[in-house]
Image (tube, rainbow, N blue to C red):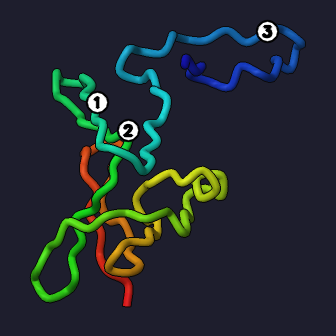
Amino acid sequence: MRKSVENLATSKITGGRRKPARIRRKYEIDRYPNESVTGAQITITRRVRGNNKKTALKTIDFVNLATGDSKVKKIKILKVLENATNNDYQRRGIITKGAILETDAGKCRVVSKPGQTGIVNAVLIK
């Protein structure tokens, strides 16, 4: 997925074509988003800038749920109820930061980024 650096869609006032001053650098190239869904856990690891690694979730079926009394429990995810990021994500059941999940313990809100950290942490909604 390669994007242009400047807005080259419009022409100059004289009618001539715009040409980029430079091409996009390797570190500026975007990737397709990693969209986590429910299912048996599958993770992928990818190299990012500075030879660092990011672990991303493809599918996950458990959430680390903070109940509020200094305890964290591993709870099964039943389904995605809401996702304010995107209405399409809500329909498809994509888990992102801020998504509302239905679990065995009740409703919870995701506070981690599953597509970048490889884990789903959530807090219980009263």
Nearer to the camera, 119 or 29: 119
Upstream in sequence: badge 3 or badge 2: 3
Label 3 close to label 2 by CB (< 8 Å): no
- Badge 3 element: loop
Question: In the rendering, at what x and y percent does residue 33 appear?
Answer: 47, 36
Upstream in sequence: badge 1 or badge 3: 3
Quarter assignment of residue 9? top right
Report the residue at 33% width, 54% height from top.
Answer: 61
Q: Which residue is mark 2?
A: 58
| Count of marks placed on residues | 3
Q: Which residue is mark 1?
A: 44
Upstream in sequence: badge 2 or badge 1: 1
Report the residue at 61% width, 24% height from top.
Answer: 6
Q: Which residue is mark 3?
A: 17
Report the residue at 49% width, 29% height from top.
Answer: 32
Q: Farthest right residue?
A: 15
Up the image or down, 23 lies above or below 67; here it is above
Up the image or down, 17 lies above or below 4; here it is above
Report the residue at 45% width, 26% height from top.
Answer: 31
Residue neighbourhood size for the residue with mark 2, other residues' Cα within 10 Å, grouped as few (<14), some (14–19), many (≥20): many
Up the image or down, 118 lies above or below 18; here it is below
Question: In the rendering, at what x and y percent does residue 126 appear?
Answer: 37, 91
Q: In the drawing, does residue 32 fall left or right of residue 90?
A: left
Quadrant where the image shows the N terminus: top right
Q: In the drawing, does residue 9 fall left or right of residue 102?
A: right
Q: In the image, which is nearer the foreground, mark 1 or mark 3? A: 1
Residue neighbourhood size for the residue with mark 3, other residues' Cα within 10 Å, grouped as few (<14), some (14–19), many (≥20): few
Q: Amino acid at mark 1?
A: Ile
Question: In the rendering, at what x and y percent does residue 124 appear?
Answer: 32, 80
Question: In the rendering, at what x and y percent does residue 118 appear?
Answer: 25, 44
- Badge 2 element: strand
Label 2 close to label 1 by CB (< 8 Å): yes
